[in-house]
């Protein structure tokens, strides 16, 4: 599978420690990883890591299968040589997992895993190799959650390295914050950015089969009230829908950022409603060529599988401690609040294309943006609760209740120089994003 994370699993024990418990843990923890981490490839060591010869054989196995991360479960006490050899030979991060000690019965220690994990971690630290320590058995929710989070963060990091973002056009007039440093993005995130000119899109629009356009127009007219659209706008919508699909497939773009005005508006084809539809088809397109906001969108999508929403923060309500997030009308249909009407109308600002009007659903959300500040990336991060919202302006909008006083949020944004676009996803992945930022050596902007 493309970009799939390869996780090496090894159970270790040193010297004369009994082998019964390590053999039991090898089976038990290997099965647990297979069941609980189906999104990654678990590569099981063929034997216990119980001798220098065994470790060399396992290193060869892991190297042959391109292991990206190693989970070392302590079957029982293990000296520093094992973790050090794995790190030196494979040069990938290690997760040192120390299950709880079996019940004490007055006899000898059977595992002594905690001591092994802490001493091995200290040695790796001295040698300059990254590692994480997990203390607790797999049936402890805390330990299980930590392992899953570490693996998920490394999984996202690997996906980023193979991600291809298409820049369709560049940035709108006077939107300086949509400019970006392609080399820095490649170096920090491993993302490849390629460009397609808007003329390619316009040419494809003109070439779409008339019958396909007619069918799509009929389907949209049956699903939504399109009576408020000016003549020709729905046809442009359907032509753009197929044209962008073709571009994204032909260029093999995983995600895109689009210069959505002024040229598209001049041709009466501002793309908000089309972007909304494509978002639910796993073709996520960021607005106004904002590549740094696109980075947050990409990561939120990888972490949740859900369509994020690129937006502006347009209002603060200090009485209810909510922030209002809005944009022209490109939020995925799946994000709309089913209790409120959703309509397909003319663009709410330019009046030169199609956009959905509506409010977005309730639920936990993560608000994020990567910011290139002084040639160095930082992550603006906030979590909250999307609450029931009454639409009071054209476009799509949602109110988000946060824990921090909203005035402090604004003060932080202004003080740090955070640009105006944010990516919101309907799940709390703020902890995961913090962990990923740490892995990428990116500072998190704290609201204080």
Image (cartoon, grey):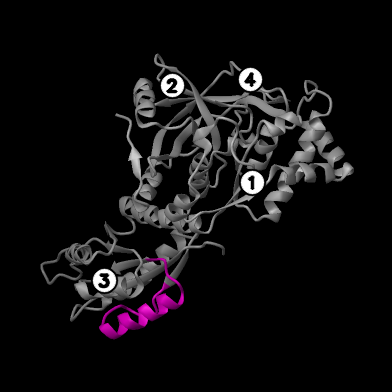
Numbered circle sitting on residue 322 = 2
Residue at far left of view: 106
Q: Relative to 160, does residue 307 appear above or below in the rendering? A: above
Secondary structure beneath dot 2 equals strand
Q: CA distance from mark 2 to mark 4?
A: 19 Å
The quarter of the image holding the N terminus is: bottom right
Q: CA distance from mark 3 to mark 1?
A: 42 Å
Q: Nearer the viewer, mark 2 or mark 1?
A: 1
- Pinpoint residue 135: horizontal percent, then vertical percent: 25, 57
Q: Earlier in the sequence, mark 4 or mark 1?
A: 1
Secondary structure beneath dot 3 equals helix
Q: Nearer the viewer, residue 392 or 23?
A: 392
The residues colored magenta run 44-69
Q: Earlier in the sequence, mark 2 or mark 1?
A: 1
- Pinpoint residue 73: horizontal percent, then vertical percent: 30, 67
Residue under the image location 52 percent in, 46 percent down: 298
Q: Earlier in the sequence, mark 3 or mark 1?
A: 3
Numbered circle sitting on residue 273 = none
Q: Earlier in the sequence, mark 3 or mark 2?
A: 3
- Pinpoint residue 188: horizontal percent, then vertical percent: 42, 53
Specify few, some or many for label 1: CA neighbours under 10 Å numbering under 14, 14-19, or 20 or more.
Answer: some
Left or right: residue 199 versus residue 327 is right
Specify few, some or many for label 4: CA neighbours under 10 Å numbering under 14, 14-19, or 20 or more.
Answer: some
Q: Which residue is mark 4?
A: 394
Secondary structure beneath dot 4 equals loop
- Pinpoint residue 417: horizontal percent, then vertical percent: 39, 31
């Amino acid at each position: 599978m493309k970009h799939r994370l390869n996780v090496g699993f090894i159970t270790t024990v040193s010297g004369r420690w009994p082998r019964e418990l390590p053999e039991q843990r090898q089976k038990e923890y290997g099965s647990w990883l297979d069941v609980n981490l189906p999104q990654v490839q678990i590569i099981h060591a063929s034997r216990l890591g119980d001798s220098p010869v065994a470790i060399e054989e396992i290193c060869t196995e892991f190297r042959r299968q391109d292991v990206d991360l190693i989970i070392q479960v302590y079957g029982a006490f293990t000296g520093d040589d094992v973790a050090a050899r794995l790190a030196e030979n494979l040069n990938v991060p290690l997760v040192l997992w120390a299950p709880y000690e079996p019940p004490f019965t007055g006899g000898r220690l059977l595992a002594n895993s905690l001591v092994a994990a802490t001493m091995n971690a200290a040695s790796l630290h001295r040698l300059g190799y990254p590692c994480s320590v997990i203390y607790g058995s797999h049936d402890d929710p805390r330990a299980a959650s930590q392992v899953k989070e570490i693996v998920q963060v490394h999984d996202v990091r690997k996906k980023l390295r193979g991600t291809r973002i298409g820049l369709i056009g560049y940035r709108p007039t006077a939107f300086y914050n949509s400019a970006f440093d392609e080399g820095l993005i490649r170096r920090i995130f491993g993302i490849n950015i390629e460009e397609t000119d808007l003329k390619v899109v316009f040419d494809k629009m003109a070439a779409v089969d008339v019958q396909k356009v007619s069918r799509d127009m009929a389907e949209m007219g049956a699903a939504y009230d399109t009576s408020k659209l000016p003549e020709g706008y729905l046809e442009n919508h359907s032509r753009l829908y197929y044209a962008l699909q073709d571009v994204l497939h032909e260029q093999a773009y995983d995600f895109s950022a689009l210069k959505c005005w002024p040229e598209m508006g001049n041709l009466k084809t501002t793309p908000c409603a089309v972007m909304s539809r494509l978002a639910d088809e796993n073709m996520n397109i960021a607005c106004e060529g904002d590549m740094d906001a696109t980075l947050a969108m990409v990561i939120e999508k990888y972490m949740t599988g859900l369509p994020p929403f690129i937006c502006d923060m347009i209002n603060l309500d200090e009485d209810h401690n909510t922030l209002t997030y809005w944009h022209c009308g490109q939020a995925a249909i799946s994000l709309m609040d089913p209790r409120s009407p959703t309509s397909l109308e003319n663009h709410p600002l330019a009046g030169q294309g199609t956009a959905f009007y509506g409010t977005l659903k309730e639920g936990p959300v993560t608000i994020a943006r990567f910011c290139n500040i002084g040639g160095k990336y930082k992550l603006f991060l906030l979590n909250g609760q999307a609450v029931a919202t009454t639409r009071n302006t054209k476009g799509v909008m949602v109110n988000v209740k946060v824990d921090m006083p909203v005035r402090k949020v604004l003060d932080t944004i202004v003080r740090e120089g955070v640009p105006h676009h944010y990516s919101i996803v309907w799940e709390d992945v703020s902890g995961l994003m913090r962990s990923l930022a740490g892995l990428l050596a990116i500072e998190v902007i704290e609201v204080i």
